[in-house]
């Protein structure tokens, strides 16, 4: 059981809040709330986040402990939820290779380490119980569910229908895991019932085709959830809060999922069974609708929280595209939600609540919704973050920004994400840093990427944040300045960092010099107009974004890619929808193909097995890049320490550039 003195905890934090400007800017966020016997100092919750940081047999690692400590510290008294734990020895409920376990008492010491660091940082400890159901069994050749409805995800495993005995065993496993959570010292027990995991499988008419008491109408489909809640309550007693996460809108209409009205029945049934707080979510992993991507406006899903408030009396929390403290504070003040829940925003900046409390909004490094964290999970890899290179390295002192042993004069050539991040870290370590950019705008390839039509302007936020932090760290900017060997010789830097990015190039083939052959950035920035029939030569991320941009303008785009599919470097959360939009305007794709020649009105494509295909084209847009390396050799002759980073090394994606910059900034 938790030994936290909640009265003392709330009193301590409230006294601290009074001294901070954020308590006046956001009066609702930093107001306490009591749920059963647990008194919570503020209204902020870090949501359960699978991170794949633990051992493959479920034991907690130093890496996960350090990661959770950083989030707990940043919560300034809020609720810190650890990742969902799996609860069965076979691993049928295990959805991630590095997921923590709670199916045996031997896991209690590791779980206690997490609870202890949360408490040491003055936060409330919450453990989530999670059986992944039809998306579980990550290391098995099958998964389980209420019925054998096939899943449509990446794994495509056969689904084994659970027997009544297996259902009862699963309910008992939830209760036993809750007991272990209490013994490990957690203040709150949370149950996961979302995104296509087991409880949601029972609740949904899409996946529950049973004809016994666990299937049929919505009340019967709720039976498994109700029995789990009741079993957990029997274990934890009347003083410990039970939270649950439930879909308010499954977004499974095409598959025959629950209606929004049926979803509200699940809320009422959960409340009646004894839950004390409901986290409002929407969508499944199998939904064909956008849920957490950039094209969803901030605060869009609050209407579901408002609807939930009309059906239940217990407190409501919500995450999902609710990144900014001013929006969350307003929602609490208007009675739409009671608790602001965050996952990705606190991956990107674990100090987000602390910075809001201190009134340092300009210092918050906002999530750009690139979903790299999710993409890593889907590849069974530990999470990382495009904008926060420290994620997964919190435990490693070598990744901390520390004062340099010797101050150096550093010349950073290029103001894209790699150059900005490197300049920031180097300046924070005490170096004299000068950043040179040949244009009048910072951002490199992000300038082009942010021109995309589906909320991509949000990407530029990280460039604006890096610029503000560089200014605070003392970086000197030299805009509209093209660095030459002569300038390096004149300035005599101790270190030169080449972050000049990559340039778009037109491969030499017959007809590649024709006037209707143009570059992708010229299209995205409106410098050239295309015809109605466009060939996109190159199918990596740059080409896909440009093709999408043109598709939204009604152009018929044919993508020519050497890869097995377009957008192999684009996040899976986005690429399928981008390609859907492109196909809806008549777009096509040629895989394992290349342009052999270009003529007026068409290109000749050489496809797989050497087949040659004429493709109509009013305009050919080239999206291929190669590193800008012209300064590298000269810099090496003039300076004893030269580093090449970002796309100047190898053209890649945004996170590679930022992480390159961070690592080299530490090394200088």
Image: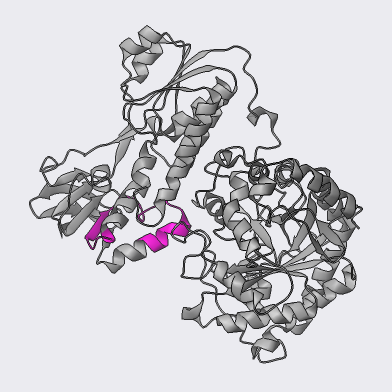
Q: In this view, does 80 lie above or below 498?
A: below
Residue in view at x 83 percent, y 54 percent: 107
Q: Is residue 19 above or below residue 126?
A: above
**Whether residue 161 can be seen here:** no
Front in this rendered view, residue 338 or 344: 338
Residue 406, quarter of picture: top right
Image quadrant holding the C terminus, namely top right
Image position, residue 532 (x, y; %) = 16, 60
Front in this rendered view, residue 416 or 231: 416
| Highlighted range, magenta | 551-578
Left/right placement of residue 282 relative to residue 92 reads: left
Image position, residue 392 (x, y; %) = 64, 41
Image position, residue 317 (x, y; %) = 67, 64
Asked whether residue 563 is drawn in magenta, I would say yes
**Whether residue 262 can be seen here:** yes
Residue 574, quarter of picture: bottom left
Left/right placement of residue 233 relative to residue 251 reads: right
Left/right placement of residue 432 relative to residue 46 reads: left
């Amino acid at each position: 059981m938790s030994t936290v003195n909640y009265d003392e905890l709330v009193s301590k934090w409230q006294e601290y809040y009074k001294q901070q400007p954020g308590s006046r800017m956001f009066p609702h966020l930093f107001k306490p709330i009591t749920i059963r016997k647990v008194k919570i100092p503020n209204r902020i919750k870090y949501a359960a986040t699978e991170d794949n940081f633990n051992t493959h047999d479920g034991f907690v690692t130093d890496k996960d402990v350090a990661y959770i400590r950083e989030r707990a510290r940043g919560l300034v008294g809020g609720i810190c939820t650890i990742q969902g734990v799996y609860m069965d020895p076979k691993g049928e409920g295990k959805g991630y290779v590095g997921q923590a376990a709670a199916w045996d008492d031997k896991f209690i010491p590791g779980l206690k380490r997490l609870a202890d660091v949360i408490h040491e940082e003055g936060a409330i400890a919450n453990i989530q119980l999670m059986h992944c159901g039809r998306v579980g069994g990550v290391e098995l050749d099958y998964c389980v569910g209420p019925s054998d409805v096939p899943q449509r995800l990446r794994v495509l495993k056969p689904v084994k229908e659970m027997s009544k005995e297996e259902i009862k065993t699963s309910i008992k496993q939830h209760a036993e895991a809750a007991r272990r959570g209490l013994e490990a010292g957690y203040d709150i027990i949370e149950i996961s019932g979302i995104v296509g995991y087991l409880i949601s499988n029972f609740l949904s008419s899409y996946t529950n085709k049973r004809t016994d008491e666990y299937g049929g109408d919505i009340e019967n489909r709720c039976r498994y959830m109700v029995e789990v809640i009741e079993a957990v309550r029997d274990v934890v007693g009347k003083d410990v809060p039970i939270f649950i996460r439930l879909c308010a809108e499954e977004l499974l209409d095409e598959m025959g999922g629950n209606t929004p009205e049926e979803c509200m029945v699940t809320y009422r049934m959960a409340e009646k069974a004894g839950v004390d707080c409901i986290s409002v979510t929407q969508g499944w992993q199998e939904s064909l609708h956008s849920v957490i991507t950039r094209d969803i406006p901030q605060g869009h899903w609050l209407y579901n929280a408002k609807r939930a408030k009309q059906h239940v009396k217990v407190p409501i929390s919500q995450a999902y595209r609710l990144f900014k403290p001013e929006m969350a504070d307003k929602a609490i003040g208007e009675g739409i939600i009671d608790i602001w829940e965050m996952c990705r925003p606190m991956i990107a900046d674990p100090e987000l609540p602390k910075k809001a409390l201190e009134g340092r909004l300009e210092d918050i490094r906002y999530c750009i919704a690139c979903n790299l964290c999710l993409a890593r999970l889907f590849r069974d890899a530990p999470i990382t973050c495009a904008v926060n290179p420290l994620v997964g390295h919190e435990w490693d002192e070598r990744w901390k920004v520390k004062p340099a042993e010797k101050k150096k004069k550093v010349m950073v050539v290029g103001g894209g994400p790699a150059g900005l991040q490197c300049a920031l870290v180097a300046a924070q370590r005490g170096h004299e840093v000068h950043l040179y950019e040949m244009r009048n705008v910072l951002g490199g390839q992000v300038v082009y990427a942010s021109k995309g039509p589906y909320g991509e302007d949000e990407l530029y936020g990280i460039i604006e944040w890096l610029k503000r932090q560089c200014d605070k760290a003392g970086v000197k900017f030299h805009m509209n300045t093209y660095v030459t060997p002569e300038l390096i010789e004149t300035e005599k830097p101790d270190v030169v960092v080449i972050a000049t990015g990559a340039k778009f190039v037109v491969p030499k083939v017959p007809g590649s010099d024709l006037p209707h052959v143009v570059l992708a950035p010229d299209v995205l920035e409106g410098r050239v107009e295309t015809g109605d029939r466009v060939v996109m030569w190159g199918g990596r991320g740059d080409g896909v974004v440009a093709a999408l941009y043109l598709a939204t303008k009604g152009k018929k785009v044919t993508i020519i890619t050497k890869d097995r599919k377009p957008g192999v470097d684009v996040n899976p959360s986005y690429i399928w929808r981008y390609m859907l939009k492109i196909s809806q305007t008549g777009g096509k794709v040629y895989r394992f193909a290349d342009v052999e020649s270009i003529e007026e009105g068409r290109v000749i494509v050489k496809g797989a097995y050497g087949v040659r295909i004429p493709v109509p084209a009013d305009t050919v847009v080239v999206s291929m890049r190669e590193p800008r390396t012209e300064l590298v050799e000269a810099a090496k002759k003039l300076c004893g320490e030269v580093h090449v980073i970002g796309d100047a090394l190898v053209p890649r994606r945004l996170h590679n550039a930022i992480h390159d910059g961070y690592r080299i900034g530490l090394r200088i």
